Image (cartoon, rainbow, N blue to C red):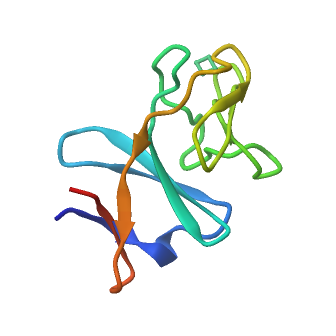
Amino acid sequence: MHKICMTEDIPEREARSFELPDGDTIFITQRDGMFYAYQNLCPHLQVELEFLENQFLDLDQEFIECSTHGALFVVETGECISGPCQGQALEKVEITVHSDGGIYLTE
Ligand code: FES
């Protein structure tokens, strides 16, 4: 089972990117004590979302934001609610938080 990181590596309303063994880049964010992971690919042009390292959220840290054209995505669902890919969604990555505090890829 692949361990990605520890829960304390991802503070509430922040995000961190990680490279998986298969080469995919994902990011994980925490909201209200829950952790959400997505592929780091905007559904608009299939580019990475962030401009600065680990900057996946908008200024208010309310939505996930694509730095290229400003699309906004709901943290909990990945759905795009504003921008050129409205109605599309980020691709969710299934993760599991184990009792050791580790965040693992769900097999
Ligand atoms: S590439 Fe993300 S909104 Fe255009």
In the rendered image, residue 14, in percent from the top left (x then y), is placed at 63, 60
Relative height, residue 7 to residue 84 (above, below): below
Relative height, residue 18 to residue 8 (above, below): above
Q: Residue at x 55, y 32 (%)?
A: 49
User: Depth check: 49 or 77 in front?
Assistant: 77
Count numbered badges in the picture.
Answer: 0
- If the picture is divided into quarters, which one holds ligand 1? top right
User: Depth check: 53 or 48 in front?
Assistant: 48
Relative height, residue 4 to residue 92 (above, below): below
Query: Residue furthest toward the bottom?
Result: 100
Q: Residue at x 68, y 61 (%)?
A: 13
In the rendered image, residue 39, in percent from the top left (x then y), is placed at 41, 38
Q: Quadrant of the C terminus?
A: bottom left
Write down the quadrant of residue 73 in the picture: top right
Q: Residue at x 72, y 44 (%)?
A: 63
Left or right: where 6 falls relative to 35: left
Relative height, residue 18 to residue 74 (above, below): below
Q: Quadrant of the N terminus?
A: bottom left
Write down the quadrant of residue 34 in the picture: bottom right
Left or right: where 91 falls relative to 78: left
In the rendered image, residue 50, in percent from the top left (x then y), is placed at 57, 36
Left or right: where 47 falls relative to 100: right
